[in-house]
Amino acid sequence: MNQARFFKLQQVLNRRQPDLTVITDNVHKSRNLSAIVRTCDAVGIHQIHSARPMDGYGTHHGTAKGSHRWLGVNIYDEVSTPIQQLQQQGFKVIAATFSDRAVDYRKIDFTQPCALLLGAELEGVSAEAAELADEHVIVPMMGMVSSFNVSVAAAIILAEAQRQRDEKGLYDQCRLDTITYQKTLFEWAQP
Amino acid sequence: MNQARFFKLQQVLNRRQPDLTVITDNVHKSRNLSAIVRTCDAVGIHQIHSARPMDGYGTHHGTAKGSHRWLGVNIYDEVSTPIQQLQQQGFKVIAATFSDRAVDYRKIDFTQPCALLLGAELEGVSAEAAELADEHVIVPMMGMVSSFNVSVAAAIILAEAQRQRDEKGLYDQCRLDTITYQKTLFEWAQP
Ligand SMILES: C[S@@+](CC[C@H](N)C(=O)[O-])C[C@H]1O[C@@H](n2cnc3c(N)ncnc32)[C@H](O)[C@@H]1O
Ligand SMILES: C[S@@+](CC[C@H](N)C(=O)[O-])C[C@H]1O[C@@H](n2cnc3c(N)ncnc32)[C@H](O)[C@@H]1O
């Protein structure tokens, strides 16, 4: 590994956001999941949580562009497990879902510890998960089609999260704990 | 057609943005093109321009969710054709591409007549098209992976365009000319 590469790894770790994450509920097309992982890497997410990714995960490496290497994907049988674990750690769970209590996604404070919850192409976020979520958000749509592709909705909302966190300086100082930082740097630096 | 449906068609046409469009350069995975079309519909784009969509267009109806019905897709052999035609009509062509002259996409005024130019997974925007473009933009990335999936990049930039146009009231009054409006309403209202 040359020095420029080692510097790049450190620079990326210095911008990782341990208090921002994504939960996917039943998103089972691995192509969608891979595109989401690639976007998560770009906004500094370090771990995501995926309930019932039925197709399996990782078959569309093309779409993920190798980003699975840079991001932990934790798999669960029940979506309630990561939701409740994250809430116990102080995260707000923000479901991207159409409902009476949904607000415009730009109204949410994404600089607080939070997890964006996304649903599947046909079913959307499950009723159980929507019920457990702290907030519901929608991305306003002006056309005939009633929803975005899930990886598109994820990207629009995460770009707003990144904008808010950038404005607040959250990418300007290292936010990973020392152990995670050192362990990840060691893993990434392996050939 | 019931009245609610007819009202919905009119409402969508009242929000169409004839001075906002997308040009794709060599984006030949029809799955990507379909996801882009679906996003375009959602931000009120009425026509897009696609140079050399090699796979053909329209095979992934699942991803487009029927949005091809609501949007004109014009096909070209050469990307220079739609770029120059749109420039003659007073559009600024804004290429999403990594270059020395690229600025943060949020710095661009998307309320002016403009076309977002997008490139392919491997090659990106061609040198020829980049040269012809009026501006270059990038979406900042904080991770290891060096680019977004093209439909993701399109969505992030178009969401910003929509935000700016919404703020300026461009969705509050009908902006299509009467002939296009009537013709489209007639077509859409067919069973
Ligand atoms: C294709 S959509 C699901 C549509 C589903 N038929 C429904 O009605 O919920 C897939 C996922 O993308 C997200 N999504 C898509 N469009 C959205 C929007 N406009 N606002 C918020 N989330 C959206 C949601 O998480 C949704 O569960
Ligand atoms: C996968 S990228 C192409 C990457 C290509 N290897 C390159 O270096 O240009 C596909 C298209 O998505 C758009 N794109 C992806 N990430 C972008 C970013 N961060 N900023 C601007 N445009 C981006 C561009 O239009 C690009 O041509």
Image (cartoon, coloured by chain):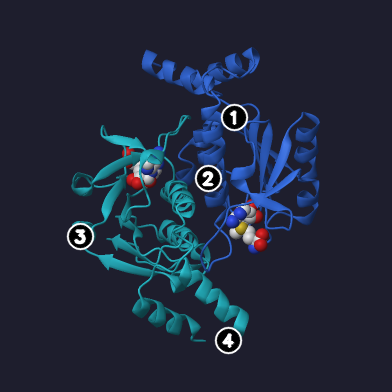
Chain colours: A cyan, B blue
Image coordinates for residue B151, horizontal then vertical, percent:
54, 50
Q: Which callout, 3 or 2, points to the residue nearer the camera? A: 2
Q: Residue at x 53, y 34 (%)?
A: B162
Disc 3: residue Cβ within 8 A of ligand 1's nearest atom: no
Residue B46, labelled with which disc? 1
Letter of the chain that mark 3 sits on in the rendering: A
Q: CA distance from mark 1 to mark 4?
A: 49 Å
Q: CA distance from mark 3 to mark 1?
A: 41 Å
Residue position for label 4: A1
Q: Is residue A68 above or below residue B106?
A: below
Judge the density around disc 1: few (<14), some (14-19), many (≥20) Cα neighbours within 10 Å. Answer: many
Q: Secondary structure at mark 1?
A: loop
Letter of the chain that mark 1 sits on in the rendering: B
Q: CA distance from mark 3 to mark 2?
A: 30 Å
Q: Secondary structure at mark 4?
A: loop
Sequence-wise first label, 3 or 4: 4
Q: Is residue B19 above or below residue A128?
A: above
Judge the density around disc 3: few (<14), some (14-19), many (≥20) Cα neighbours within 10 Å. Answer: some
On the same chain, marks 1 and 2? The answer is yes
Q: Which callout, 1 or 4, points to the residue nearer the camera? A: 4
Residue B155, labelled with which disc? 2
* Residue type, label 2: Ala
Question: Which image quadrant is residue B76 in?
Answer: top right
Residue position for label 3: A78
Image coordinates for residue A48, horizontal then vertical, percent:
35, 63
